[in-house]
Amino acid sequence: MAKMKKNMVIVESPAKAKTIGKFLGPSFFVRSSMGHVRDLPEKKLSVDVENNFTPEYKVIPSRKKLVSELLGDSKKADAIYLASDLDREGEAIAWHLTQALQLTDKKVHRVTFNEITKDAILEAFKHPNPINMAKVNAQQARRILDRLVGYQLSPLLWKKITKGLSAGRVQSVAVRLIVEREKEITEFTPQEYWKITAELKHISENTDKPEDSKAFKAILQKFKNENIEIKNEQQAKGIVDELQKAEYRVANVKKQTKRNNAPPPFTTSLLQQQASTRLQFSAKKQCLLPSSFTKVLT
């Protein structure tokens, strides 16, 4: 009797590991990486700026035992399926696992899925792909930028403001935008301007009851066929005096059809947010939401 192949699956979450293991059957065993297994060490910059910003990754100290266990399991497997999340972070986790466990490309398969159902899982394992290095590099760029900005700017905050503050790639840019905007507000010189609105009513010659005609408002755009800027009350009153003596007619009517598109379908995160805010669902209850539940919230 031929020996059954053993395939190893690595996911991020232990909860997912248990569920996915039930779907895949006895030829698969599922392990969890508990998220990232490698990162930039905290005690130094860990980015070689002079050498094309090369990162210096190390196994996270709290993950060393786990990595050792995963390494042992990987040696017993005929194939390894990396099933971390399908976003950039998940792709990077998959790549870091190949580096930490010293896995060869021939042995590694990358699988992604949008939902944890039996059909979705089995379909994903029928169509494995290589690791998407474009996503991995995008995550690395974000992580390196975080480190470069945070480690070099945070000491300035400690010196100028107070100890314990940290600066990041997003906060630093956001603070600058706020400061520049505040500067514009402080330097702004207020200028008086006036707007004139007329309430008009169309009275048709064929209408027996003029009071049935609907009134509408019109904003003054031009005066005597010229664009006008009303800068003070005296100027506004003079224009109003002339307008009260004038006759009005509708020069042109434009009709157009507006298209209202249906809102996009729920993403998993937005569905969970709406379930929490509108229906007060707990996190545990949200995990059990069926796909048809979106009809309740739309």
Image (cartoon, rainbow, N blue to C red):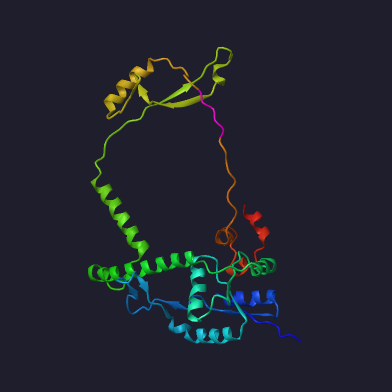
| Spot occupied by residue 147 in the image (x, y as percentages of width and height) | 35, 70
Q: Is residue 254 magenta?
A: yes
Is 259 situated above or below 155? above
Is 107 situated above or below 113? below
Is 232 situated above or below 293? above
- Residue 241, located in which quarter of the rendered image? top left
Residue positioned most to the right? 1
| One can see residue 166 in this view | no
Residue positioned most to the top? 205
Q: Is residue 195 magenta?
A: no
Left or right: residue 198 compared with residue 106? left
- Residue 232, located in which quarter of the rendered image? top left
Left or right: residue 224 compared with residue 32? left
- Residue 23, located in which quarter of the rendered image? bottom right
x 71%, y 83%: residue: 4
Predominant SS along the magenta part: loop
| Spot occupied by residue 228 in the image (x, y as percentages of width and height) | 32, 26
| Spot occupied by residue 219 in the image (x, y as percentages of width and height) | 41, 27
Left or right: residue 156 compared with residue 197? left
x 33%, y 80%: residue: 43
Residue positioned most to the front? 106
- Return the residue nearer the eye: 194 or 62: 62
Q: Give, as a single range, the part of the protein colored magenta.
A: 253-257
Left or right: residue 227 compared with residue 117? left
- Return the residue nearer the eye: 221 or 262: 262
Is 241 situated above or below 123? above
x 65%, y 64%: residue: 289
- Return the residue nearer the eye: 237 or 111: 111
| One can see residue 260 in this view | yes
| Spot occupied by residue 182 in the image (x, y as percentages of width and height) | 28, 51
The quadrant of the image that shows the N terminus is bottom right
